[in-house]
Structures are given as C-alpha cells and as structure tokens.
Image (spheres, helix red, strand yellow):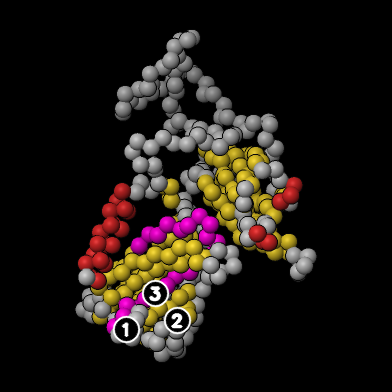
Amino acid sequence: MKTKNILTGSLLGAAALLAMAVQAGPDRDLHINGHFRGTPQGYDPAPGWTLTADGGSAKILPTRKPDKFMLEIKADPSRPQSVVSGMHPVFGNTIEIKADVSGRGYAAIAYEAFDQSGSRLLGTDKRSCTLSHRAEQKLKAYFPIPGPARLIRIRLTAEAGSAAFFRDVEAELKYIATPPPPGTIAAPPPPGTIAAPPPPGTVAAPPPPGTVAAPPPPGTVAAPPPPGTIAAPPPQPEVSAPTLQHHQYFELKALRPVEHFQTLLPVRGEIRFKLQNYPLRRQYWTVVSYDARICRISYRQDRDRIPPFRVDKTEFEVKALRPGDTTVELACGRKRVYVRVSVR
C-alpha cells in the first residue's frame, strides 16, 4: 500500500509539472550545507542540520570526492527519522528541492513553511521514493509556498525501518507564474497597471472611426511599418503617481489603504526602499505579484534599535532585468502598495 501511494504521488507530481507553463524569474539558493561539509566523519548530523528526536540516528560518511560528504539517516522500525535545516526567509512562491539518494526502504524530501515567529506551521509537503543500494537516484520536487509564509526549512527523512544516504542536497526559491485553467476569466489588473508592450517591430494599424477591430486569426503576424516610419515613444509613467525615491522610508500610519508609486530604471539599474511592518499584529510586508521577466524583487526584514523603541521594517530591492513595464504589488495586512516599474 505504501509503494502504491508513493507511486501515485510521484505520477501526480509529474503530471502537475508537465501541465504547468512556467515563467520563472531569478532563483535564490538556500545555504543548507547540502554537501555536509565542516564536520569530522561520524558527526551527528552536520552543521546547518538538526536531528529530530525520533529515536533514530544520523552521521556523516565520506564519499569519493574529498570536499563532499553524505548523510546517513537510520530510522527505528516503528517511526521515521528526520533531520531539518535552519530557517530561511521566503523568496518567491515556489521551492525546488533535489537530492541524490540511495539505501534501503524509503526516503523523502520535504519543505515546512512557518510564520514570521517560526512557531506556527503554515504548510508542508514531501516527495518520497523507494531506495536501492545498487543505484543512486535523483529525488526532485517543486512545492508551492503558502502566501502568508515568512520562513521556510528543509526536511530529509528516512521512513520507518529505512536507512537513507543523502548526497548533493540543493534547495532553490523561485517565483513561478502559472496561467489560469482554460476558460478562466482573468481578474482586472490593479489600478495603474500598464499592459505588456507588443513584440518589437509590431505595429497595430488604427481602425476606421467608429469601427471595432476584429481579433486577428491565430498565427497572424502584423505587417512591419513602412520605411521611414518613426516608432511611437515608449509609454512614460503617469504624472499622478509620485516617483519612488532611492532609500525612501514609509511609516505604516502614513500610508493610505492603497498607494501608487512609479519608478523609471535603466537595464541593470536598481532602487531600494523600506516599508514599516506591524509586528504587534504579525503583519509584515510581502511581495504579491510582479513580472519576473522585467525585474527581480528581493527583500529582507530590518530592525532598528532595541525594545521598546525597535522599528521593524522590510527593505525591498528592485533590480531591472530587461526593457518593459510591470506593476509590483506589495501587501501588509489590508494595505497595498503598487509600484509601477518601467525599464528602458
């Protein structure tokens, strides 16, 4: 029965990956000591990892490469045994975990997502496989991260009665945008959103006055402009939205429920700004959506001074990747901030 459940889970996971049209932005590696370096042979278990109190054991063993080691996890016959990594800040909406595994019985890789305090579990999932002493295999999985999550960690497990050997464990945080199911009507974009520009060289002919243009047939390519035609200038940010300043800081009480800003960046340019958090209500700013093809968003929690005068802030960095326009949506409780990023 366990083998059947594992096989079913693997098939469903593979089908989900094949069905997902991925638009991925920059990835962020988690520093989890996946080669298990820095400890003598036999250490229990390795720097950056903690053995859970389940009655089993874990130790470091050498490999054929002098700078890489493997982690052996042995479980009691009645329950699984795990090691867990430290906590890491969440970036993006998906985590990819992969490891080379061998042994006997069953092994699993998993993620666990927590709130800002690290005490409340908000989501977890795992991928399992049947082990073999003769053949090492790649165990790999993508897991969606719950939106409210602020911290994440990795769990490596040998199931009950199993002995698993883990090598080359890696974890990457990603932003992956998936299209809605067929027939789904997309929600209107937030106020101030600019539609994505057409492909370079495409010129839409204006329809006659009063005429509603029919959509072109699938696969139709718009005719290039006549020789000597001057392309229209790129859209500029609206004057009504204030321009975001580098290293600008906003207090939470000074922000309205919905705020709009704009910024114009060159390719590879960047801008940083800070927004105040509301830790008493466990409300912290996070990224809701943006086009990861146009820019990269990274953020970290920043604390000034000591209690009771401490100020909790989230520092955001927007780095331009390629020409285009996108709207970055940020959220904290019921407040929303929209930053329209134009890259030229």
Foreground disc of the pair 3, 2: 2
Q: Tag 2: residue type? A: Thr
Is residue 64 among what the camera can see?
no
Q: Is residue 222 left or right of residue 137?
A: right
Q: Which residue is mark 1?
A: 78
Quarter occupied by residue 167: bottom left
Point out which mark residue 52 bears: 2
Q: Secondary structure at mark 1?
A: loop
Q: Tag 1: residue type? A: Ser
Q: Tag 3: residue type? A: Leu
Task: Give above or below for 282 relative to 217.
Answer: below
Graded by Cα atoms within 10 Å as few (under 14), some (14 to 19) or many (20 or more), the crowding at tag 3 reads many
Does 146 appear in magenta? yes
Quarter of the image with the C terminus is top right
Q: Secondary structure at mark 2?
A: loop
Query: How far separated are the C-alphas under marks 3 and 2?
Result: 10 Å
Task: Give above or below for 79 relative to 224.
Answer: below
Residues 43 and 283: in front is 283
Q: Estimate the x, y position of residue 39 in percent, counting from the top left.
A: 47, 86
Residues 102 and 125: in front is 125
Q: Residue at x 65, y 41 (%)?
A: 258
Q: Estimate the x, y position of residue 13 in percent, counting from the top left.
A: 30, 58
Residues 295 and 227: in front is 295
Q: Which residue is mark 3?
A: 156
Q: Residue at x 59, y 48 (%)?
A: 330
Badge 3 or badge 1: first in the primary sequence: 1
- Asked whether disc 2 touches disc 1, contact meaning CB atoms under 8 Å apart, the reply is no
Graded by Cα atoms within 10 Å as few (under 14), some (14 to 19) or many (20 or more), the crowding at tag 2 reads some
Foreground disc of the pair 2, 1: 1
Quarter occupied by residue 159: bottom left
Part of the protein shown in magenta: 141-161
